[in-house]
Amino acid sequence: MAPMITRECSRALRSAQPVSLIVCEIDFFRSYNEHHGSRAGDQCLAKIGQIIDDNARRAGDLAARYSE
C-alpha cells in the first residue's frame, strides 16, 4: 500500500489536485467477532471490503485493510 500512497501523492502534486485518504473503523466489531467467531468476522470484513472496493472507481482508488 505504501508505494500506492507515494505514487498518488506525487500525482496530486504534479496536477495540483488534492489527495484523500479515508480510514474507517467498524463499531462493535470486536463484540461481533467474539459472538459469531473469527471465521464469521473474517467473512464480515471481506463483505465490507468488497462494498468499499466496488465503489472505488477511479484508476488511483485503492481499498485496503490496515490492522494494528
Image: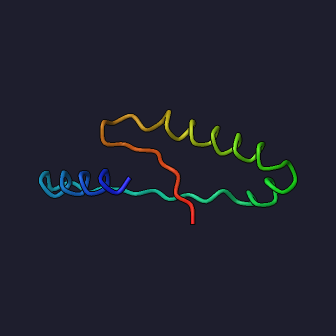
Query: Splitting the image into 4 quarters, where does residue 29 fall?
Result: bottom right
Observer-nearest of 66 and 51: 66
The residue at the far right in this view is 35
Identify the residue at image location x=53%, y=41%. Answer: 52
The residue at the far bottom in this view is 68
Residue 57 located left or right of residue 54: left
Number of numbered callouts drawn: 0
**x, y percentage for residue 57?**
39, 34
The residue at the far front in this view is 39
**x, y percentage for residue 15?**
14, 51
Observer-nearest of 18 and 51: 51
Above or below, 44 against 67 in this view is above
Residue 7 located left or right of residue 35: left
Identify the residue at image location x=50%, y=33%. Answer: 54
Query: Splitting the image into 4 quarters, where does residue 28 fall?
Result: bottom right
**x, y percentage for residue 44?**
70, 43
Identify the residue at image location x=70%, y=40%. Answer: 43
Scheme by which the image is coloured? rainbow
Identify the residue at image location x=62%, y=42%. Answer: 48
Above or below, 29 against 55 in this view is below
